[in-house]
Image: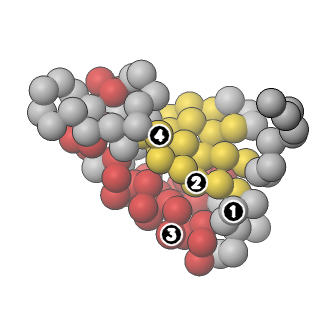
Amino acid sequence: MKQENVPYEKQIFVCTNDRKGESPSCGDQQGEAVFKELRGIAKERGLHPRIRVAQAKCLGQCNRGVNIMVSPGEIWYHGVRLEDIDALVKQHLQS
């Protein structure tokens, strides 16, 4: 095993867990769409992979979804909707 520093300036994890209606999940709240939109913007701006937008299958708070965790800074968002994308971009995807 080798240990290194994190190779990204920033990581944004978007929960995309979909429990298919068995219990509340970020998938019920368009987690996949939020992830795709944020990642697409990061790529368009040439920020990816320096700023990594990745999907997380579960962040353990699905009843509060869509959940997003940003590191460094240990920032947590919940209840994220597609209409929140602009604010997230301004906060975390500026070049």
Image location of residue 88, percent across then percent down: 55, 53
Secondary structure beneath dot 1 equals loop
Task: Please give the residue where the numbered disc 3 appears in the rendered image.
Answer: 40
Mark seen at residue 49: 1
Is 45 placed above or below 15 here?
below
State the SS at label 2: strand
Q: Residues within 10 Å of mark 2 (few under 14, many from 20)?
A: many
Q: Nearer the viewer, mark 3 or mark 4?
A: 4
Q: Nearest the camera: 41 or 6?
A: 6
Q: CA distance from mark 3 to mark 4?
A: 16 Å
User: Which residue bears the numbered disc 4?
Assistant: 56
The residue shown at (69%, 75%) is 46
The dot on residue 20 is none
| Amino acid type for the residue under numbered disc 1 | Pro
Q: Which residue is mark 2?
A: 53
Tell me the amino acid under the disc marked 3: Gly
Please provide percent x and percent y for residue 64: 35, 27
Please state if 12 lies on the left or on the right of 77 as rendered: right
Q: Quadrant of the C terminus?
A: bottom right
